[in-house]
Image: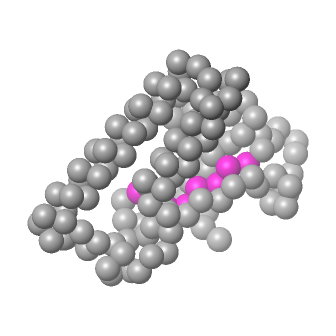
Amino acid sequence: MKPMVETKHDLLTSNYTQVFEEANPQNYAPSTFEVTRKLDANTEFNPETDLLAKIHFQEGPIKEKGVNGINNEDAIVMVIRRLQGFQDSPFSCRENAMAITKLEEALLWLRKRTMAREKREVVGTSAV
């Protein structure tokens, strides 16, 4: 098991859950994340009840390492789909619509990056 550290971000709240990432990531960015229930200092972590999700992203280029995790686009689409579900319910709101728009914009930019790598014939490799 990889050593984990708590993920820090100015907009991330940890009122109910905490996000952790691998402490010493390979390939410049963390590939393994865990989301746990928020525990107080006196509570011992129980992985059977306190680990809510473990997400493993692709490690290394697919052509070099094979498919071994999800990609950024997969995670973004999951959040879009969840927000669209709320938009199709009584919980529809402007904030969800704006978040969907921005997430779709993020997908567009990631697709543009992939298209540029395809054009240079380096997609799926470690070539820059």
Image quarter hosting the C terminus: bottom left
Q: Is residue 25 visible?
A: no
Answer with left or right where residue 26 lies relative to residue 36: left
Q: Which residue is rendered at x = 60% and y = 67% of the image?
A: 2
Q: How many marks?
A: 0
Q: How is the image coloured?
A: one colour
Image quarter hosting the N terminus: bottom right
Answer with left or right where residue 102 lies relative to residue 113: right
Which percent across, then down, holds residue 55?
59, 59
Q: Which residue is rendered at x = 21% and y = 58% of the image?
A: 115
Q: Nearer the viewer, residue 41 or 47?
A: 47
Magenta segment, principal secondary structure?
Answer: strand
Answer with left or right where residue 50 lies relative to residue 87: right
Q: Which residue is rendered at x = 47% and y = 33% of the image?
A: 100
Q: Nearer the viewer, residue 9 or 107?
A: 107
Q: Nearer the viewer, residue 91 or 29?
A: 91
Q: Which residue is rendered at x = 50% and y = 64% of the image?
A: 70
Q: Is residue 31 visible?
A: yes
Which percent across, then down, holds residue 87?
60, 29
Which percent across, then down, holds residue 54?
65, 59
Up-down: is 62 above or below 74? below
Up-down: is 68 above or below 38? below
Up-down: is 4 above or below 90? below
Answer with left or right where residue 62 lies relative to residue 39: left
Most extreme residue toward the left, as rendered?
Answer: 120
- Asked where in the image residue 106 lies, by quadrant, the reply is top left
Stretch in magenta: 29-36
Most extreme residue toward the top, as rendered?
Answer: 94
